[in-house]
Amino acid sequence: MSTRIVVVGGGTAGLRLAQRLPVTLLGEEPHTPYNRVLLADVLAGRYAPEVVALPEPREPVRRGVRVVGIDRAARTVECSDGELVPYDRLVLATGSNPVLPPLRGLRGAELPRGVHSFRTLDDCLALRAVVRPGVRAVVVGGGLLGVSAARALAALGAEVVLTQQGEGLMERHLDPYASALLREHLDGLGVETHTECRVSGLRQRDGAVTAVELADGFVLDAQVVVLACGVRPRVALARAAGLDVRSGVVVDDELRTSDPYIHAIGDCAEHDGRVYGLAGPALEQADVLADVLSGTAGPRYTGTRALTRLTLGGAQPLDLAAFGEATPRAGDDVVQLADATKGAYRKVVVRDNRLVGGVLLGDLAAVGALARAWEGDEALPEAPLLHLLTHDGGSA
């Protein structure tokens, strides 16, 4: 008898596993699985929703199915309509939820009219329905998601204000110089950016947002507010089932949870103390788990050296890539090349003759060579460090 594999979650990780193995895939969203990375392009109108759809797996995805419980003893999952789905192996690919900041005017997950998160295709379509030229939009959060949303809203003709609590944009990925270049790029698109700026509350009238209040007392008029304050692993189902959960669902090198019959992959999984929250690691975890579940003697999961690459498209496109540790420690070697006229910047950090991180903005010609040197984690050849930034070895 074949092993019954049930996958909860139709995102990047769950779909990849379903493309490799015959599984029952339960997806909560009503849509065909889609490429979440391209949501900003859908919002900006560059792609129609059907363009970002991903190929269906061997067995059709069961869409609009929300799993509400796991019975580990009976090895069944319970769906919101009462259906019980039995499993021999269960895979949690539940992804992540948007972080809703503790603001005055927000009550739990219920958002006032005009306030939107930006995580799903439904979020994207809801924004598309209300944004028109001249609409005053405030984006809360200057990370990768917030920057992408701000650009997309500006492309729709909105008057966009981007607020970031930290000192620079995309601080998780970029160093201060690259962050400043990114800010200049947004300025050129008409996006008004405020850093070191904490949002404290929302003003409303008749249930609709009218303004954003800042901690320093300043008020930003707003007809639309986008909350792009990051994501956190979606672990409520695993926690309720009694699985080991820290930041994410804890897994070993076979992506196995504290229950030997349950695995976790993607944004909800925590391996060796780390939750990645990126598409690359999710795909790698799904591939490893496919080998584990099929009995293939492939390599086990030891972590992913994830390179973040983003193309901010439109009339004035901007490419950026970041990997590893972009902030050097004492004793590290650093090489930087900047071309202010072209808005281009390259930087690498070398420690003990190994490439440990880098940032590229505006000119990604060297990203292929840099990615290979970093992913290989091998001693660098005896050559000037400048060679790393000027060797145009193709794109990754």
Image (cartoon, rainbow, N blue to C red):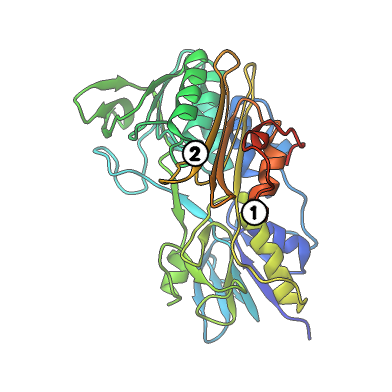
Residue wearing tag 2? 118
Outermost residue, front side: 382
Q: Residue placed at 64% from the left, 16% from the top?
A: 315
Image coordinates of residue 99 in percent, x first then y, are 40, 47
Q: Is residue 11 shown to the viewer in this render?
A: no
Q: Where is the C terminus found, in terms of image quarters?
A: top right
Residue toward you, 258 or 320: 320
Secondary element at image label 2? loop
Q: Residue placed at 49% from the left, 54% from the top?
A: 96
Residue toward you, 3 or 251: 251
Q: Is residue 16 above or below residue 382?
A: below
Image coordinates of residue 188 in percent, x first then y, are 51, 13
Image coordinates of residue 81 in percent, x first then y, are 54, 66
Q: Where is the N terminus found, in terms of image quarters?
A: bottom right
Q: Give how far apart the Cα atoms at labels 1 and 2 are.
A: 41 Å
Secondary element at image label 1? loop
Q: Residues within 10 Å of mark 1 (few under 14, many from 20)?
A: few
- Mark drawn on residue 254: none
Q: Residues within 10 Å of mark 2 (few under 14, many from 20)?
A: many
Image coordinates of residue 281 in percent, x first then y, are 61, 56
> In which quadrant of the rendered view does residue 142 lie?
top left
Q: Residue placed at 80% from the left, 62% from the top?
A: 58
> In which quadrant of the rendered view does residue 320 lie?
top right
Q: Is residue 326 above or below residue 20?
A: above
> In the image, what residue type sits under mark 1?
Ala
Q: Is residue 207 left or right of residue 385?
A: left
Residue toward you, 304 or 118: 304
> In the image, what residue type sits under mark 2?
Phe
Residue wearing tag 1? 379
Residue toward you, 363 or 370: 370
